[in-house]
Image (spheres, rainbow, N blue to C red):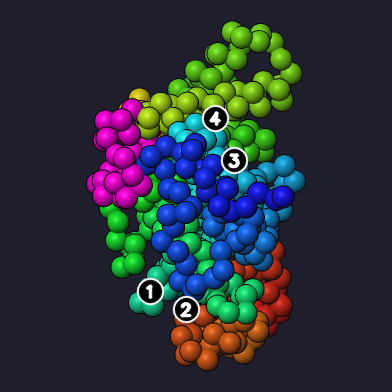
């Protein structure tokens, strides 16, 4: 016989740490549903995220380099998959709920605008006075309202814990605002794991992509970045001379491995010190428990500063992104004047008479290439 949800929940009880979030203890969904038969509640959440159009569109959204710049460079989708993998690894090591951590990681960028953080900034500016725009809140909006796949409710109707993780998602790149229905001091440990896994993925794949496109060099990284210098030194001592591609790949692999080990060891010690015995005990704490050691955090801040100086604001990256977001701004102003030119879903939402938010939702859901195509069709063609 197939394994039942009850048996899966019993396995969780036997394996998970006391402070892990159990799927059997979920606070439930906004819209009541029959529980899944052969999956836990969080496994159902994960599957709903993966099968959503918003998830598929991440393939054509910018991570750092404008989508389409290079076939080997990360997209918002490949970044999301890397975050999910790292989240599962950290959660497993700490005996947390891997399915919940993975779900939050897979969904954390569903609301991201086209053209990366530059696109997010311009939408936030254009929505000043109309509620602003921030991609974590938009991810929650996607799963609560904008996806339309089920007959009985809007959105994906995810569990409270998955939605909590999206609303409380915060990395060095993200500063979400609180919402009244998520007034907890700290989110679950699984949500905290997804938060930090996002940073680990950022640091590693931005180094990789920067070297791949020639904007960063290993020689300069050895000289200027402690994280790289230590990993590269270890690889050289352990394996000697290697082909350039292998050496670079393995150095980044060592960086990821060291980041994960540091998070697991530091977090394990923080959990012991806090003496939490249940998931809600974690939520009452003022400071997250999933964290880097002070030394690792110092080195990561140095790396982050270096990436901003040498990569994110490099004209090769920054100028095309700024040109792209100008298209986004022009599209925003166009649709405010011509709302009938938006798609069918936006037309339905227009009946609620919230024009600015409808236009923002419509643009945030676009891929990079669709936004550029629509700009060419609707704006550039009229000049």
Q: Earlier in the sequence, mark 4 or mark 2?
A: 4
Q: Nearer the viewer, residue 274 or 36?
A: 36
Q: Is residue 234 shown above or below 94? A: above
Number of marks: 4
Q: Is residue 97 shown above or below 178? A: above
Can residue 166 be seen at all in this image of the molecule? no
Can residue 29 be seen at all in this image of the molecule? yes
Q: Residues within 10 Å of mark 1 (few under 14, many from 20)?
A: few
Q: Earlier in the sequence, mark 2 or mark 1?
A: 1
Mark in front: 2 vs 3: 3
Q: CA distance from mark 3 to mark 4?
A: 12 Å
Rendered residue at 37%/36% (across/down):
291
Whole-percent x and y of residue 48?
62, 62
The secondary structure type at the circle numbered 3 is: helix
Query: Is 268 included in the stretch rendered in magenta?
Result: no
Q: Earlier in the sequence, mark 2 or mark 3?
A: 3
Rendered residue at 41%/61% (across/down):
27
Q: Nearer the viewer, residue 201 or 194?
A: 194
Magenta region, residue range = 269-292
The answer to whether 302 appears left or right of 327 in the picture is left
Q: Which residue is mark 3?
A: 85
Mark in front: 4 vs 2: 4
Q: Which residue is mark 4?
A: 256
Q: Are marks 2 and 1 in contact (CB under 8 Å)?
A: yes
Q: Earlier in the sequence, mark 3 or mark 4?
A: 3
Q: Which residue is mark 2?
A: 357
Query: Is 270 included in the stretch rendered in magenta?
Result: yes
Q: Earlier in the sequence, mark 4 or mark 1?
A: 1
């Amino acid at each position: 016989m197939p394994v039942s949800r009850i048996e899966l929940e019993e396995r969780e009880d036997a394996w998970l740490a006391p402070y892990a979030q159990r799927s059997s203890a979920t606070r439930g969904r906004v819209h009541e549903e029959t529980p899944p038969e052969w999956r836990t509640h969080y496994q159902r959440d994960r599957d709903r995220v993966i099968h959503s159009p918003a998830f598929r569109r991440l393939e054509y959204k910018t991570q750092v380099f404008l989508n389409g710049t290079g076939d080997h460079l990360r997209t918002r989708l490949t970044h999301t998959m890397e975050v999910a993998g790292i989240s599962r690894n950290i959660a497993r090591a700490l005996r947390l709920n891997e399915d919940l951590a993975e779900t939050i990681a897979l969904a954390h960028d569903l609301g991201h605008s086209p053209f990366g953080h530059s696109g997010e900034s311009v939408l936030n500016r254009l929505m000043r006075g109309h509620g602003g725009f921030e991609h974590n809140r938009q991810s929650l909006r996607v799963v609560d309202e904008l996806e339309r796949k089920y007959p009985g409710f809007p959105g994906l109707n995810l569990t409270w814990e998955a939605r909590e993780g999206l609303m409380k998602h915060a990395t060095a790149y993200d500063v979400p605002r609180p919402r009244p229905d998520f007034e907890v001091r700290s989110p679950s440990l699984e949500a905290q794991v997804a938060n930090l896994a996002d940073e680990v993925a950022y640091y590693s794949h931005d180094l990789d992509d920067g070297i791949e496109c020639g904007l960063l060099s290993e020689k300069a990284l050895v000289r200027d970045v402690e994280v790289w210098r230590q990993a590269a030194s270890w690889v050289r001592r352990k394996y000697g001379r290697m082909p350039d591609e292998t050496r670079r790949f393995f150095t980044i692999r060592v960086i990821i491995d060291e980041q994960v080990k540091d998070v697991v060891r530091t977090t394990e010690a923080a959990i012991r010190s806090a003496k939490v015995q249940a998931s809600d005990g974690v939520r009452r704490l003022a400071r997250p428990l999933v964290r880097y050691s002070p030394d690792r955090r110092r080195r990561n801040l140095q790396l982050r500063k270096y990436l901003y100086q040498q990569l994110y604001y490099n004209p090769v990256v920054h100028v095309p992104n700024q040109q792209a977001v100008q298209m986004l701004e022009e599209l925003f102003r166009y649709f405010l004047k011509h709302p009938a030119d938006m798609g069918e879903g936006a037309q339905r939402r227009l009946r609620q008479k919230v024009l600015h938010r409808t236009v923002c939702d419509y643009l945030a859901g676009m891929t990079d290439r669709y936004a550029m195509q629509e700009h060419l069709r609707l704006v550039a063609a009229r000049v």
